[in-house]
Amino acid sequence: MMALEDQIAAIEGMSARERKAEWHRRIGTIAPPAFGSGLLARALAHELQTKAMGALSKADIKRIKTLGSGKGSTPATDLKPGTWLSRTWHGEVHQVVVLENGFEYRGALYTSLSEIARYITGTQWSGPRFFGLKSPRLGKLVVSANGQ
């Protein structure tokens, strides 16, 4: 089997007709008529990448939408590595360390604060909200989510 990069390079080298045939072979439907050859190549490459590496998480999609809206980054992305977050839940103190590419909680690595909040509470939570990063009190104290 070819490496992902080689498969994408092969798509780039295909004619429009070959890309449409590849779409039908991989997706099982006729290629959307509105897709030009370039868009079809990008869609096929996306399909390959999604199958190889998995789809983006809801948190990643939300972060991308936030960045694209010009409203700034989410509080979780503003956190500096090494920052400690603490939350008391049902009388127990839970501490999280912000890492370069995720979070450490009790010796395990997590990709989002929401995963940790869900682990602690057993239910769906917004991680930044759970750890108080969206609290309006931060603004009153003239403190941002990253402590500056």
Image: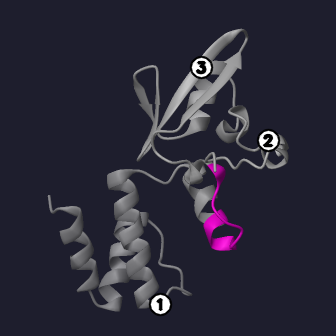
Q: Earlier in the sequence, mark 1 or mark 3?
A: 1
Comparing 77 with 28, the one in front is 77
Give the residue number, with chain letter if any, for mark 3: 94
Q: Tell me the quadrant of the picture where the N terminus can be found.
A: bottom left
- Residue 127 lies left or right of residue 6; in this view the side is right
Give the x, y percent position of residue 69: 69, 72
**Amino acid carrying mark 1 in the image:** Gly
Give the residue number, with chain letter if any, for mark 1: 36
Helix, strand or loop at disc 1? loop
Q: Earlier in the sequence, mark 2 or mark 3?
A: 3
Q: Is residue 117 visible?
A: yes
CA distance separating discs 1 and 3: 51 Å
**Mark 2 residue crowding within 10 angstroms, few (<14) / some (14–19) / many (20+):** some
**Mark 1 residue crowding within 10 angstroms, few (<14) / some (14–19) / many (20+):** few
Comparing 111 with 21, the one in front is 111
Start-end of magenta stretch: 66-75
Give the residue number, with chain letter if any, for mark 2: 135
**Mark 3 residue crowding within 10 angstroms, few (<14) / some (14–19) / many (20+):** some
- Residue 2 lies left or right of residue 136; in this view the side is left
**Amino acid carrying mark 2 in the image:** Ser
**Amino acid carrying mark 3 in the image:** His
In the image, residue 78 sits, relative to residue 105, either above or below, namely below
Give the x, y percent position of residue 74: 65, 55
Q: Earlier in the sequence, mark 2 or mark 1?
A: 1
Do the CB atoms of the residues marked 1 and 3 lie less than 8 Å apart? Answer: no
Q: Which mark's residue is nearer the viewer, 2 or 1?
A: 2
Comparing 75 with 29, the one in front is 75
Give the x, y percent position of residue 27: 43, 65
